[in-house]
Image: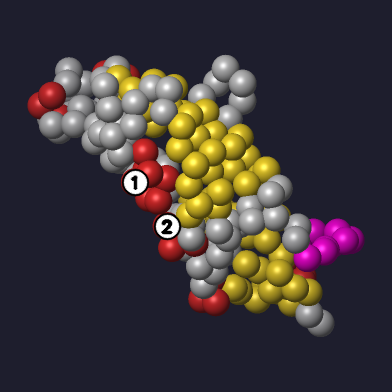
Amino acid sequence: MKADTNLFVSIDYNLSLDSGEVIDRSEPGRPLGFIFGRGQIIPGLERALVGKEPGDRVQVVLEPEDAYGNASPDLFRQIPIANFPQGMELKPGMSFEVRTAQGPMMFRIHEIQDEVVVADFNHPLAGERLHFDVTVVEVREPSIEEFSSLFGGCGPEGCGSCSSGCD
């Protein structure tokens, strides 16, 4: 079977930056699994995997536009230092999670000014060129459970395709 839309695909991978630093990898014996064509992995990597079969190896370099995008200046915000825990030593590069009406959001301290922290809400890999070394481990039909997790209990054809009672 070849990697294609709505199939379950699992991969072993190493992800590195231009510097050669490996920043992520699948754990030995625990490949990353996803439903192909459903936006669960970055677009450029998914395009590189189209039609690949178990055992195929893919080495691809992705520009930011095909990965996490370029850093957007609109995602930098000033937060008063008084909003941080008193006595905490704040430093550029520190990461925090905040709860918003849309759910949790992560940010990194970009800069500390007089009374404010400049927070960067961009993805940590925004603006980075990514180097992937991937081996396809498995391509198969997804289980009902794997597919239903995408649709809140429903299959690919909608609520009528399963017995979850979500009609």
> Residues under labels 2 and 1: Cα distance?
9 Å
Q: Is residue 26 highlighted in magenta?
A: no
Whole-percent x, y for residue 44 in the image:
40, 51
User: From the viewer's perspective, is residue 49 above or below residue 28?
Assistant: below
Q: Which residues are magenta?
A: 84-92
Q: Residue furthest bottom?
A: 114
Lower sequence index among marks 2 and 1 = 1
Residue beneath disc 2 = 66
- The 10 Å Cα crowd at callout 2, few under 14, some 14 to 19, many 20 or more, is some
Compared with 161, 66 (above or below) is: below
In this rendering, the answer to whether 59 lies above or below 56 is below
* 165 or 90, nearer to the observer: 90
**Amino acid found under the numbered disc labelled 1:** Arg
Q: 8 or 14: which is nearer to us?
A: 14
- Which residue appears at 79% of the width and 59% of the height? 85
The reply to whether dot 2 and dot 1 touch (C-beta < 8 Å) is yes
Q: How would you rate the neighbour count of disc 1 (Cα within 10 Å): few for under 14, some for 14-19, many for 20 or more?
A: few
The three-letter code of the residue at mark 2 reads: Asp
